[in-house]
Every structure is written in C-alpha cells, then in structure tokens.
Image (cartoon, coloured by chain):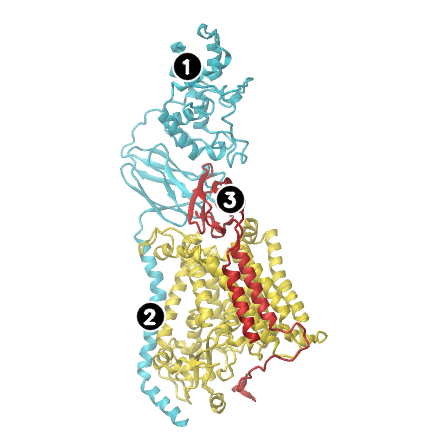
Amino acid sequence: MAADWLTHRGVKSAKKSVNLSGEFLARFLLALLVIGTPLWIWAARRGETAVTVHALMPEKGGFLPDTLTAAVGVPLELNLISDDVMHGFAVGQTGWPAVDVKPGQMTEVTLTFAEPGTYTYYCTRWCGPNHWRMRGTIEVTGAEEREAPPASPPLYVELELDIDAPHELDILLKTPPSAARGAELDITLPSEFLSRDVYLTQTPFEVWQALRLASETAALTDEDVWDLVAAAWHSQTTDEQIQRGQTLYNQNCAACHGSGGGGDGVFGQAFDQASDFTDSQTMLGASTAVFDGKIRRGGMGTGMPYWGTIFTDEEIDALIAYLWTFQFPMDNE
Amino acid sequence: MKQQRLWLLFIVAIFGVAFAPLPLGTAVPTSRTVRLEASSFEFSPAVVAVNPGDQVTIELAATDVMHGLYLDGYDLEITAEPGQTAVLTFTADKTGTFRFRCSVTCGALHPFMIGKLKVGPNLLLWRSVALSLLAVLFFISREPLFVNREPLSVVRKPNAEYEIRNTEHGIRNTEHP
Amino acid sequence: MKRSDLTRIPVVKALLVNRWPQFILRIVALAGFVVAILAGLLGTPVGSRNLSIVFVWIAWWALLILAAVPLFGRGWCTVCPIPMAGEWLQNGALLGPRKRETGDQRSETSSNLQSLVSSLRLRPWPKRFRNIWLQNGGFLLLALFSAVVLTQPMVTAVILAAFLFLAVGAALIFERRAFCRYLCPVGGFIGLYSQVAPLEVRVRDTAVCAAHTDKTCYTGNENGYGCPWGVFPGGLIKNTYCGACLECLRTCPHDNIAIQIRPVGADLTVARGRKLDEAFKAFIMLGSAVVYSAVMLGPWGWLKTTAYSVGSLAWLGYALAFLLLILGALPGLFYLATWAGTAQRGNRRALRQRFTANAYALVPLGLMAWIAFSLSFVFANISYLWPVMSDPFGWGWDLFGTAALNWTPYLSRVVPALQTLVLVGGLAWAAGTARKIAAEKRGGTAVPVIIYCFFITVGLLWLLIG
C-alpha cells in the first residue's frame, strides 16, 4: 500500500508543469467558448442593415415600428418577423404580393418605391378580431417634391351621399332576382338603365321603381322586373371582376361578414354585428356609391375597417361586384 | 411443472390479449362532415368519433388566429384562417384513436393544442389495459393475499457499510458488520 | 447478480480518469447553456423557434429522460456545466487540483484567485436541510409554472441563469457542491431515478477503504478533489447521491473504485437508507407525469389556458388542485394501500416505514410514466430542432441550411404502441419491485400497492393513448 502511494506521488510531481499548462489551456478553452460565443453572435449581428419589423397581435402592439421612411428609388430592406402568431405583410395600392410573417421566422422583403407619398402597410393574415387595426405607414420622399395630382374625391363625397343613413326597404323578395331569367324575358331595356352611372349611383330599388313605370314592363310581374334589374347590374360586371372580388372578400371580409355574406363570420359578433349582404331589405336600398364609400371610409366606430388606403379603385369595384352577387346570384354557378 | 404451466398460460394470454383479432363493429360506412372550430389552444369539439371506413370531411374553421390541423397516423395536414374554412376529406381506413394537433404556431401553448379522432374502438387502449391486468394478476398470483405470512425471501445484505459524518477533522467512519 | 466492472477495461478507465474528455463535454455543455440563456433573453419570444426552449425542453429533456437517466443514472450530472463556475472559485483551478500547500511551503502558482479561495470560509450545509425536501419544493414550484416555463424563452433563460447564480452562490457559502446535492430541482429526480440505472459507482473492496486512513476520496489529493457531493464512496449502497463526477476514481490511491454494469433497478430493493423525502419525490414525479399528460397532451383547452394564466384566480385553483393531488391524494391513497397490505396496522411507526419503503416501487412506475409522456411530446416536436439549429435566435440565420424545414411529427403511428409497452412494462416492473419490498418484512403483502400501480397505469394509458 505504502509503495503504491509513493509511486503516485512521484509521478505526480514529475507531471507538475504539464498539469499547469493544462490548467491554462482549460481556462483558455473555457474563455474562448463562453466569451467567444456571445462575441461571435454580436459580430454576426453587426453587419445587419435591414430594418427589423416585429409583428404582434394588435392588442400587443401590432407592427413595431409602425412608421417607416424611405426615399424614391432607394430599396427599403425589411426583416419581418412575428413575435406571436401568423401575420402577413402587404403594402396597400401597390399590387405587390403579400408575404407571410411567420412566428419566430424572418421574412426578408425589399421595397423600392417609384412615387413619393404615404403608403400603408397592413397585416394580411387574420390575427384576431382587431386584425385590421394592424397597419403602419411608410413615408416615401422624392428627389424633388412633385405636386401630386389632386386625387378625385370618392363618389359618395361627390354625390353628397350620407352613407350612414339607414337604407332599409319595406320589401321582401321570395326568390332572389336572376339576371339569367331577366335575359330570357327578351326585353330590350332602355339604354339609360344600362349606363354605368345608374349602376354606380342608383339603388336597385330606385331602378326597379323606374322600370316598373316604364311601358316596356307593363305586362311583367314584379318579380320579372326584379330579374331585369339583376340583368342590368350583371351587365356592369365581368366574371373576372367577380372572381377577383371573391378572393378579396374571402381574405379580408369573410371573417366578419361570413363566407356566405350572411354577417355570420367568426368575428361577426365581436362588433356591433357585421352587415348581412344576403338581406335584400338593406341591400336593395343601397347604391354602389354607398358601398364604395363604406369600404373606403370604414364604419366609423362599428368595427368596419377603412380600406381606402389599401385597395385600389379596381379592387374596390371588384369587391362590390362580388357583393352584388349575394343579391343577384350568378346563375351559371 | 405446475409453475411452468402457469408461465405458459400467462405467455399464451399475453399473446392473445396483444394480437387476437377482434371485431371492429359492424357499422355501415357513411360519409360525415365534422365542423371543427379551432381557437387558441383548443379544438371544438376536441374529440371526434367516426366509424371505420367512413368518408370523413373535416371543416376546419379558425375563430381567432390562423390554425392548422395535423392528423397523427394519417399524416394529413390543413391550415385555416378566420373567414376561410379549410376542408379535408379522407377515408377513415385506419382504426384506433389518433391525436390531431395544431400545425400553425398560434401562441405560447401551440404545441399543446391537441384533439382526438376516434376511428372505431380504441383496441390499443383496451389491449393495453388487459395486458396491465394480466401483469397485475401474474404478480398477485404469486403474492399472498393475506398479510400474515412469512417473508418470501431473504434480502441480500451489503457486505459492509459505512456511515459518514462531517467532523472538525474531516470524516469519521463507523463500520456496520 | 454478477456485475462487470468497466474500469477494468484500460481504455475506458483512461478516458474516465483523464480530465479532458469530461472537461470538453462540460465546456461544450456550458457554451450551449450560455447560448440558451442568450437566446432566451435576446431571441424571438416564439418558443418553438427559440433555441432556449427547443434545446432545453425538447432536445435536452429527450436526452435526459429517454437516455441519460435510464441508462446512465446521473450521467447528466457528470457533464452538467452548472457547478463549474462555483467549483472553480472553490478550488482555484478549473481542470484539476494544482500543487497543494503542504506544510509551510506556499505554492508558487498562487494567484489572486487562490487567495480568494483561501479567504472563503466554507460552511457545511445546514443539518436540517440535509435531505431533498428543498429539491422537492423547487421542482414543485417549477412544475406549477411549467406551462409558462416550457413555452416562454425569456422565463427559461431567467431560470437557467438563476440555476447558475444559485450554484455559484451556494459554492461561495457552503462546502462542496451544495447546489447539486441539496438544491437543484433536476438533480433531485435524477438521483431518485438513477437508482434504476444499470450503472453504478462502488468500491471493489470495502476493507481497503476501512484500512485507508487518509480517505482521499473524501478529502482529495493532488489527483483530484474530495467527493464534491459529500459522499464517502466506501459507504455507497445506492446511486442516489453519487454524482458520477468520477473524482474518487482519480483520487483513490488503491484503485478501489469500480464503475459497474449491474441489473436494472438494483437499488430499489436495498432496504437501508430509504427516506420519506425520497418517497415524496417519487409521488411528486409520478403525479407531475399524470398532470402533465392531462394538461399538455389532453384535449382540454381550458385546462391549458388555466395552467398558463399564472396569477389568476383560476390558476390558483389549478395550483391548489395540483398540490392536493401530488401531496395529498396520491400519498394518501398510497398510505391506505400500505395500511391494507400490512399486518401491523396499529403500529404507526412500522406503518410509516412501510409507506416509505413501498414508495420505492413507484420509482420505476414514475420513470416509465415520464418516458411514455416524453415519447409523444418529443417525437411530435423534435422537428423544431432542425430550424432552431440553423437559426437559434430567430434572426433569419441559416447556419446549416435547415432554417426553413417545416415542423412535422415523427413516428406518429408507432409512438402509441411504444407508450403502451413502456407503461405496461413499468407496471410489471413496479409490481415486481413492490413484491420484493413487501417481502423484506414479516406480515406484508404487495397486493394493494400493485393495485394502486394498476390504476395509475390505466389512468396514464387513458390520458396518453386513450
């Protein structure tokens, strides 16, 4: 035993110097890893030039930051990342495709603006009842400030319409009016009923009343006249327009108004009650101009968002064309 | 001999319980549609029962944020956004109980958002309960049911044991024979 | 039964005695630990995309409960980086003991660090806390907040950092690895379950230890430190408090330390040294496995939300129910089972001793319950690991080209069958253990305890594969 002990000691003292350098190597390695790793992380982060935009549920802050600046022609690099659930990102009225902003995953986008102005970016994935509040603005400054052409005021302003006025009718249609049946009646409508102006400014009920009084419809039933109205409305829209409108509707409106237009979407109850587009009493007393106004301006406190800074005129037209199909269904479907 | 027979009996029973074919019910397959509402962090209804062979259509409606559904065992997946109901149709050709999970990160508890699809009886559960019962019976059959019995075996004692106490000088050990 | 001694294989012994393999593993683990803390503090708050959550609660947990604990017992403690800083301060050296001061001759390598070390007046751990009640409490406390801890990177980071600070703090006040031995909430259950591991550190011949007056395994020498866990290897009869740190292998001058492969569960039927705190650890672990299976893997959304809404009234109710189940109902019913299975029902002391002894049958049951729970949790979510490896902070990195890989559950068809095998196997194991424990003393039957285990198993089966 004692001999054992002695050998151990002997070996040990001979190794003393080796042991010491081992200790310093160990400390060096430890320092390298424990200090080096954070340093490496820090260094890797330093070169980052892109602006990081965090996306959170609107109740938690929405887009952070929600104001950005850019210059015309200078690419704006954005790193988009969600801190909670799936969000989306798109810039209104540009037609650029929306991108998903995934939880904990960076999405890189580069935006280059050709025109100065104020752009709105918005969330494109439903992220709660307040999803539509999740918006931000990009101020784009030009090389030389050009005088922007004065935007024409929305139709409802031009017409001095009160888009918040109630427009319920006292009528009840048993079957929805059909453009196809209207066409089958083989009646040539006076051209004034087929004008764009009528579609934009008149309510279907007003047109129905006028038609009822016209001599061409004397032999027709009230329902037949409604079919004529449907045909008149149909003549102002195209299938592509309606299809585009449907896509926009499903993405942006169905969560509240319901995919069937019945005002029964999952968030329909979260607000005052989303409008029911299948209800003929309210729909037939409203004009395209009223819808246009409501979509652009929003519901002013009812929970209906304003889309004026987001949708292009064509998109709003397409959307309204689709809304009318809840009253005047497409027969070929 | 008797002991051996008992062992054999148990082994036969284990295999029987584990692998014996069992009737899966005689319900005629139909098609059925289930509307599943997905909210953080719950599917409603959370448990869906169908019969084997049914043509199942799941309408997944997200009611707050985007959710998904991944069906274990069938390895099918759909995602749904509020306002845009997703539809998944499949034939329930595998029997048993399968978990379905949210597949789109929907918040902190997302990994735990789970529901169950029951296709016919959960034979795995019944078989495993029966196996547990067999295991219990096996051990109980070798155990006296009444407590006034002699010890079954002599417990091995460690060769020698030490107790250690911290004292001023370090340690002190006491030997136990 | 025959045990085979791994240290008889020269390569294995050399690898274990040499400090470098262990040290390398520990600093790699420490770097991972530091990155996990940084990720939790600086990275994305989305848990499934943050390294801290995915590495700690999916990868590390899988490794720990599915491999390290059942195969190596305290294997994790061997490489755990948490005590490193504290030990460095205590010892004045990182890798191994330096030249010791003998007599009046001061070491020439004496540094500032060493003078700091010698100025520390380390106290022995207070007597009344020389048990695992603090660890029991610590684990329960973490378990109550588990829905938050497991999902919020920031919380995980703070807890990891707190472990580190507590370990350093404990090392500056108390002797040896006080944190590991008496405070670490993880170490408590690793110790309990290491009793079933097929690996053990023991002495070859206790007579050698008895004759060895220096007891270098406890006091240390120039080859290694005295047992950091405050355990005398010569007295080891169970794995529970042996930290598998390998120091005694280095310090024993008589080559008397063995690392042996042994039958699984060998410590459970050792009658000596059973304690109530360990018995309660068994209830806490078994109960948490049941609660976690219900809360996290069950179909009840309200339960998940309640467990998550820490501080709310509903959560207080949940916490109360959790504690009542684990500290009241489970041990209470088990006490009844013990009472029914003993002849000396009037003798309270004997009854309590039997209760404590019987609880060791719940060790394999609890471990298997945790394995079954973890199987479904881990295989469903391990695919989060690939993107997180490439993008640990959610900053858009792609280190290994795996950042865009999607989540997908693995083996979803096989896992339920595996869980069945694990749970039924655990029940059989527990029942066999219960029989051996009951047979230790006159006048007892394991039947009620076996039935208790049966009901727990059926409950778990229903929760996990029902």
Can you tell which mark lies on residue B39?
Answer: 3
Q: Nearer the viewer, residue C220 or A17?
A: C220
Mark 3 closeness class: few <14, some 14–19, many ≥20 residues within 10 Å? many
Chain seen in red: B
Q: Residue at x 39, y 14 (%)?
A: A194
The chain holding disc 1 is A
Q: Which residue is mark 2?
A: A29
Q: Quadrant of the N terminus of chain A?
A: bottom left
x, y (%) of residue B141? 61, 71
Q: Which chain is in yellow here?
A: C
Please indicate, yes or no, whether residue C326 appears anywhere in the rendered image. yes
Whether callout 1 and callout 3 share a subunit is answered no
Badge 2 amino acid: Leu
Q: Which chain is cyan?
A: A
Left or right: residue A116 versus residue B104 is left
SS at mark 2 in the image: helix
**Chain at tag 2:** A
Q: Quadrant of the C terminus of chain A?
A: top left
Sequence-earlier tag: 1 or 2? 2
Q: Is residue B17 above or below residue B2?
A: above
Q: Position of residue C32 (x, y in %)?
A: 39, 64
Q: Nearer the viewer, mark 1 or mark 3?
A: 1
Whole-number angstrom distance, CA of label 1 to CA of label 2? 88 Å
Quick check: B64 above or below C54?
above
Element type at mark 3: strand
Q: In the image, which disc is placed on residue C424?
A: none
Quote the CA–CA distance across marks 2 and 3: 49 Å
Q: Identify the residue under disc 1.
A: A184
| Mark 1, other Cα within 10 Å: few <14 / some 14–19 / many ≥20 | few
- Name the amino acid type tagged 3: Ser
The residue under label 1 is which amino acid type? Glu
Which one is in front in this view, the residue at disc 2 or the one at disc 3? 3
